[in-house]
Each structure stands twice: as C-alpha cells, then as structure tokens.
Image: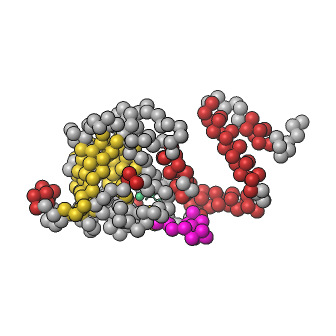
C-alpha cells in the first residue's frame, strides 16, 4: 500500500505522469503540479477557499462559448498572456501583444493603399509603415491581418449596426515591404465584464479599460508570426491597460497632416492624422535569450 502523506503527495502525483512519452509535456505537467501544490501549502489553502476557486472556474466555463472565452480573458487579466508574449519577444524585433477575443479569420483581402473608411464616423488616420528583417531588409512576402473597433468603441461582433467586414482586412505589403492603410482612430474599450472576471474587477476596484489600439498579425514565410497591437500615445488608459498589453515600442504617434497633394492622392477632402509603424520580424528559427523577458 502506498501511504500518501503531505510530504510525498506532490512527488507521487508528479510521478503519475511518468507514462507521458513527450518529454516537454511531461515536464510541464510535473511543474504545474509542483507549483499548484506549493501554492496550496504556502497559503495554507482552506476547503472554503479551494471551493471558491473551483466555483470561479465553473462560472468561467458556464459563460464560455465558441466565440467568447472567459479562460482567454482570465489569462489576459492575470498577465499570463503578456508574460508568454514577452518571453518570446526577441530584442531588436517588434514585441508581441495580446490577440484578444475579436480576431476573426477570413477578413476581406485588400490591396495597399487600403481604405477601410466606408461610412465610419471618426478621425481619419493614415497608418503606414514597413515590414523588415533584423538586418533592415524589406520582407516583401509579408501579409498583414488588421482589425480594430469603431468610433463607438465596439467591434463589429458587438454591434449589430456594423457590417461583419467593418474595419478589418488582410493585405500584402508592396514590393518595397511597405503599406498604407486609411482608417479611423480607434477608441478605448472595456473588456467584457458580464462573467466572473467582471466580478473580480468589481471587488478589486481594477479598471476594466483597454487603451485604444489597432490589432495586427504579420506573417511571412521564413519568419516568426507577429501578433501585436499599436497604441495611441494620447490615450487616458495607456498606463492602466486591463490586460497589460502596452509596450513602449508599440506606442505610435499621430501627426496632423494637411498637405493638399497628399489629401488628393488619398481621396480625402479634409486634414487627417498619420501614424507610422515599422515592423521587424525575427527569422523563423531565431531564439530568444533565456534571461530576456
Ligand atoms: C481586445 O483587444 O479587444 C481585448 C484583449 C484582451 C481581452 C479583451 C479584449
Ligand atoms: Fe482589441
């Protein structure tokens, strides 16, 4: 008989995964058990607290659907998503930031210069920039998947007034690795608060707001895929992002423009703002120094 007691339980549970053939998976599970048990021991977790934790997970499962994951949100608001992003970001390349729940596959393909204005109200922004490698060479086969919220702060999934293709697109950079995209200035946005995460925010007095941002996914054969966001430097929530996504390198200044020739070229009848964002992608097999986070 195996006598289970407080001092051997962790090792016994860890050993129960010894049959997992994949070494990395086995290591992750052993570490997870070790850290969970250490948490319970160090906090002297009571039955009531343990039950409350399970109840929280139960509520999260209850509200989760295919299109709305309270578990992703949990990872975001506990900073785990950002930690994984930061650990995999190679110095000298563009840092990653949270994907969020509003990325939808299959956005319409467009050609740079892209125009997403349609009949959206809001301040007009020309987002422009380039995609390059670590040596500064243009990556001419890069594609960009782009999405953002509308002037009322809502993504199309949250707003029956918006078409399902509003303010989202995919496009290839041009032959010099550059792109231009006409759109509107995004707005700050509240994370969903109708589930247990919302309750957690209410009891902790935490701000549920995300600073205004554009989302992009940059992909190119031979390079690591980048999932990131571009932030508005004038946003009041820049220092209190509910999901910890802001990085200095992702804050993109908006410059007022009123050059008549540029306005004519862009088909605009009014001044606009321009924001420049240059992406640097690491090669597919590049590693991140282990002490970098
Ligand atoms: C967003 O960018 O819209 C978002 C990101 C993480 C959690 C909730 C929303
Ligand atoms: Fe977002």
Using residue 153 as the reference point, say whether residue 40 is left or right of it. Answer: right
Report the colour scheme.
secondary structure
In the rendered image, the quadrant that contains the N terminus is top right
- Which residue is found at the position 43% from the left and 41% from the top? 91
Q: Nearer the viewer, residue 194 or 226?
A: 226
Is residue 282 placed above or below 147 in the rendered structure? above
Q: Nearer the viewer, residue 12 or 116?
A: 12
Q: Nearer the viewer, residue 202 or 90?
A: 90
Question: In x, y percent, where is residue 174?
Answer: 22, 41
Question: In x, y percent, where is residue 250?
Answer: 38, 53
Q: Nearer the viewer, residue 56 or 184?
A: 184
Examine the image and state in which quarter residue 9 appears. top right
Question: In x, y percent, where is residue 261?
Answer: 10, 58
Residue located farthest toward the top when viewing the structure as drawn: 21
In which quadrant of this rendering is ligand 1 seen?
bottom left
Labels in figure, total: 0
Is residue 59 placed above or below 114 in the rendered structure? below
Does the magenta run of residues contain 6? no
Examine the image and state in which quarter residue 118 appears. bottom left
Query: Does residue 122 appear anywhere in the picture?
Result: yes
- Which residue is found at the position 55% from the left and 51% from the top? 80
The main secondary structure of the magenta stretch is: helix
Does the magenta run of residues contain 200? yes
The residue segment tinted magenta is 197-209
Is residue 127 placed above or below 91 in the rendered structure? below
């Amino acid at each position: 008989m195996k006598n289970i007691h407080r001092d051997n339980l962790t090792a016994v549970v860890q050993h129960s995964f010894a049959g997992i053939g994949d070494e990395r998976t086995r290591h992750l599970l052993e570490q997870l058990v070790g850290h969970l048990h250490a948490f319970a021991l160090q906090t002297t977790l009571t039955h009531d607290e343990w039950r409350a934790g399970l109840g929280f997970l139960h509520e999260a499962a209850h509200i989760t659907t295919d299109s709305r994951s309270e578990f992703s949100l949990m990872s975001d608001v506990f900073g785990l998503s950002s930690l994984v992003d930061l650990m995999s970001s190679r110095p000298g390349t563009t840092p990653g930031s949270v994907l969020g729940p509003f990325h939808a596959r299959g956005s319409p393909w467009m050609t740079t210069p892209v125009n997403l204005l349609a009949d959206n109200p809001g301040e007009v922004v020309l987002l422009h920039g380039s995609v390059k490698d670590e040596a500064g060479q243009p990556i001419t086969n890069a594609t960009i998947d782009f999405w953002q919220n509308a002037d009322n702060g809502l993504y199309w999934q949250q707003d029956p007034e918006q078409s399902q293709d509003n303010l989202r697109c995919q496009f290839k950079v041009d032959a010099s690795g550059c792109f231009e995209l006409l759109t509107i200035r995004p707005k700050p946005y509240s994370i969903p608060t109708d589930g247990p995460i919302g309750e957690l925010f209410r009891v902790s007095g935490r701000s549920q707001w995300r600073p205004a941002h554009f989302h992009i996914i940059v992909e190119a054969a031979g390079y690591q895929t980048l999932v990131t966001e571009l932030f508005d430097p004038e946003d009041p929530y820049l220092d209190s992002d509910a999901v910890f996504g802001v990085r200095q390198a992702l804050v993109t200044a908006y410059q007022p423009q009123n050059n008549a020739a540029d306005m004519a070229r862009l088909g605009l009848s009014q001044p606009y703002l321009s924001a420049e964002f240059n992406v640097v992608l690491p090669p597919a097999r590049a590693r991140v120094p282990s002490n970098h986070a």
